[in-house]
Image: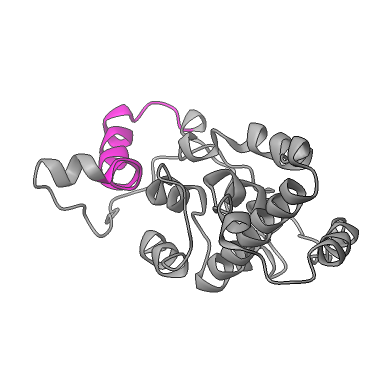
Amino acid sequence: MSNRILRVLCEKWRLTEDFDFKKLAKTTAGFVGADLSALAEEACTVAMRRLYKTLENPSAATDPLEVTTTAQLGDSANMDMDQVDSPPVSAPVPLPVAPKPRSWHLIQRFLKAYPDRLTEKQLDPLYVTFPDFLTAITKIQRTSKREGFATVPDVTWADVWALESLKDEMQMAIVWPIKKPEFFTSVGLTAPSGVLLWGPRLW
């Protein structure tokens, strides 16, 4: 679903040829439509800032903040499903604070230097890239974390002892259809819609 929403949001944008919507959808797991819309707008803003800096000073086209953020989040889409970076259950989450417009002075200088509409040649380097979205993710707080409490548990597979056969079934029924949907499609399998647990508790 996130994949389709992101494609619709970006259908009129110029994206790089190697843009990976599937990887982005995995990176934004838990984002609702409004979150994805805000993320797309922020990514577009990041791309525009890069264009401003390119036109103002071609030798300083890359924003150091974006380089640092990309390096930190580059492998975020490949993490295991049990790696949770959210606070523990019932941990209060502070309300979002509007970021300071750190690049507003840059935009002001740009508008003074280019009062007229930009030409096609000047707009040619403007593309929205995957790293732009990774940078934007750090500035977006998804709806599920703005409701007062986080609901993501901090239990991992390592905390569940024994029960190897049951864990294998859970991995195949829940984890792999999310992480590797192309595998199920290639062999003609349909991912289950859920798992029914029954029987006495084992702990």
- Name the residue furthest left: 188
Does 127 appear above or below 172? below
Q: Residue at x 69, y 63 (%)?
A: 149
Q: Residue at x 28, y 33 (%)?
A: 168
Q: Is residue 201 left or right of residue 85?
A: left
Q: Is residue 57 left or right of residue 203?
A: right
The picture places residue 118, in percent across and down from the top left corner, at 66, 65
Q: Is residue 136 left or right of residue 172?
A: right
Which quarter of the rendering shows the N terminus? Answer: bottom left
The picture places residue 135, in percent across and down from the top left corner, at 66, 48
Does 196 appear above or below 189? below
Nearer to me, 64 or 164: 64
Q: Is residue 102 visible?
A: yes
Does 91 appear above or below 61? below
Q: Residue at x 68, y 55 (%)?
A: 46
Query: Is residue 146 magenta-colored?
Result: no
Magenta region, residue range:
160-181
Magenta stretch: dominant SS? helix
Q: Is residue 70 left or right of residue 113?
A: left
